[in-house]
Image (tube, coloured by chain):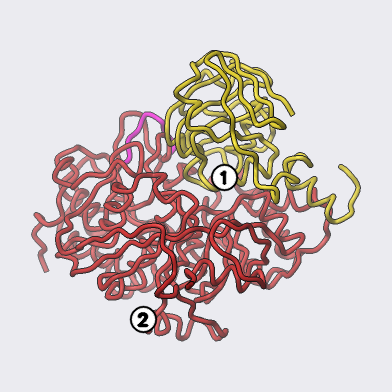
Chain colours: A yellow, B red
Amino acid sequence: MKVKGKVFKYGHDVNTDVIFPGKYTYTVKDPKEMAAHALEDLDPEFASTVRPGDVVLAGRNFGCGSSREQAATCLKFAGVGAVVAGSFSRLFFRNAINAGLPLVQSAQALEWIEAGEEVQIDFEEGVLTCAKGTIEFPPLPPEIVGIMEAGGLVPYTRRQLGLAEE
Amino acid sequence: MGKTFAEKILSQKANRDVSAGEIVSISPDVALSHDNTAAISDHFRKIGVQKVFDPSKLVVVLDHCVPAADEKYARNHKVIREFVAEQGIENFHDLNTGVCHQVLPEKGHALPGRLILGSDSHTTSYGAFGAFAAGIGRTEMAVIWATGQIWLRVPETFRVRADGDFPEMVTPKDLILKVIGDIGADGGLYRAAEYCGSAVEAMSISGRMVLCNMAVEMGCKIGYVEPDAKTETWLQGRSTAEYEMVSSDDDATFSEERAYDVGALGPQIARPHTVDNVCPVEEVAGTPINQALLGTCTNGRLEDLRLAAAILRGNKVAGGTRLLVFPASMNVYLNALREGLIETFVEAGAVVMNPGCGPCLGAHEGALAPGETCISTSNRNFKGRMGCREAEVFLGSPATVAASALAGVIADPRTVEISQ
């Protein structure tokens, strides 16, 4: 899998409340509407300017806070091709994998990559290419790769249970 | 080589010997969901399984927006009530019970040695009873319902050792805020926090719940306190189920140990907009507030209400300041009523609300307006958390919140005179 897109750059500890505010968590369910609120309290311009394949770049502890998986799915529905961060909160990490949203863990990326820059990510090779050069990143644990390959935990589980593809 | 609590529990549940860093597939003893049960049921139906794997292991609590704020929330609750009836889920606690993290212990679901997963980040609270309790997402909860199985990474464990005696008006909330401020919002990432030391041994179950509740605010997978006689006493009359007290071996590998003398600790405040932006109360004392919030899953228990009431008794909330009180459960509410605490709150000018999450996540009841400031006993102060991104939330203990409500500004509870 390859991703190519423009970078939206943020800082450390981007939390789930600014990615998808709590006031929407039980009432906003439509994917388009969820996408319209993505990163609303951090970058109100994001939802209207993001294009399919674009990359969210941030520092340490991306997605900290709530267990709400809409923090991952609203980014996916907004067309985000991958989230690149120094580290991820464990709940966001799980939710992204389960939703089939690709993640790259790299401490170097935040230093090397500028906002608005175009980057390419090759997940098979584990390489991110930016203006300043290439960054290698570690593959996902093998136990989890299958979930990503299936497109998320629901299709993966259906496959495991021998149920037909949706 | 000895094992940590986390390694022991996950070895037991996975039926093999595992160590930190490994990934296991396990089946939880308890699967908790709340108002997000409706959304989980949507994922569950997409998987295509008709019945949940074991209805007796599911616990469903309505607490995040109760009673329903509008038609959308009402529809959400309706879907949940129909789902639990359809699936035969007996452990369903409707809106007259309380916040899930108080309800599970009260109803005897949070037991030592149990593996509890909840679709809520503060599921870590049950570590106060010696359970392995972690938050998960909605989709994976649906998969647990369908298959009974989920993957977990075995966490490394670090120890927070707290010794000494808490000074007057200094509480476990001040300790955990201090710890989070020191270690940072990602300092415990993917790890388990084990709280130990004489101050933790002397601490009430309620205080231990505060420590474990907020473990997630430093990135931890779980918080844990070794269960003891106090735990057993607390559980008497609440559960008849058997349980096993599991603790870390003396020679287990801990990734780090941090030591605190609580005797030297003062009240702590987390400033906007991150929980690790912590300072002593003196640094922000005098900051004007519009709202003070006492309650939630972090600090809405009887001992919290008692402490706040002792400060409020015979006094009045400052003009221009709103004090909202959310008991953590109906059981807490009833006991507070019998003790006269509710009377104290009302006489002081507070608004006593029904048990629930209230404005903590900005869904309803007590949301903030642009430019407003709230001091709260809850666990998060992120931008927009209480419904408005142009508002500010400070976090503190029940004592600090009560003292601040009286002063109309952030106040040091040690400077307040208590009239009996």
- In this rendering, the answer to whether B396 lies above or below B262 is above
Residue at left offset 58%, top offset 43%: A93
Q: Position of residue B144 (x, y in %)?
A: 70, 59
Which quadrant of the figure has residue B34? bottom right
Judge whether residue A46 is colored magenta: no
Report the disc number at residue B244. none
Q: What span is colored magenta in the figure?
A: B387-393
Q: How crowded is mark 2: few (under 14 residues within 10 Å), some or many (20 or more)?
A: some
Q: Where is residue A156 in the image (x, y as percent from the top left)?
A: 79, 48
- Distance from Cα at disc 1 to Cα at disc 2: 34 Å
Q: In which quarter of the image is the C terminus of chain B?
A: bottom left
- Residue A40 visible? The answer is no
- In this rendering, the answer to whether B269 lies above or below B214 is above
Q: Where is residue B57 in the image (x, y as percent from the top left)?
A: 66, 70
Report the disc number at residue A68. 1
Relative to residue A69, is residue B233 drawn left or right?
left
Same-chain status of marks 1 and 2: no
Residue at which label 2 appears: B230
Q: Please, what is the three-letter code of the amino acid marked with disc 2?
A: Lys
- Provide the major secondary structure of the magenta segment: loop
- In this rendering, the answer to whether A100 lies above or below B21 is above
Q: Nearer the viewer, residue B248 or B415?
A: B248
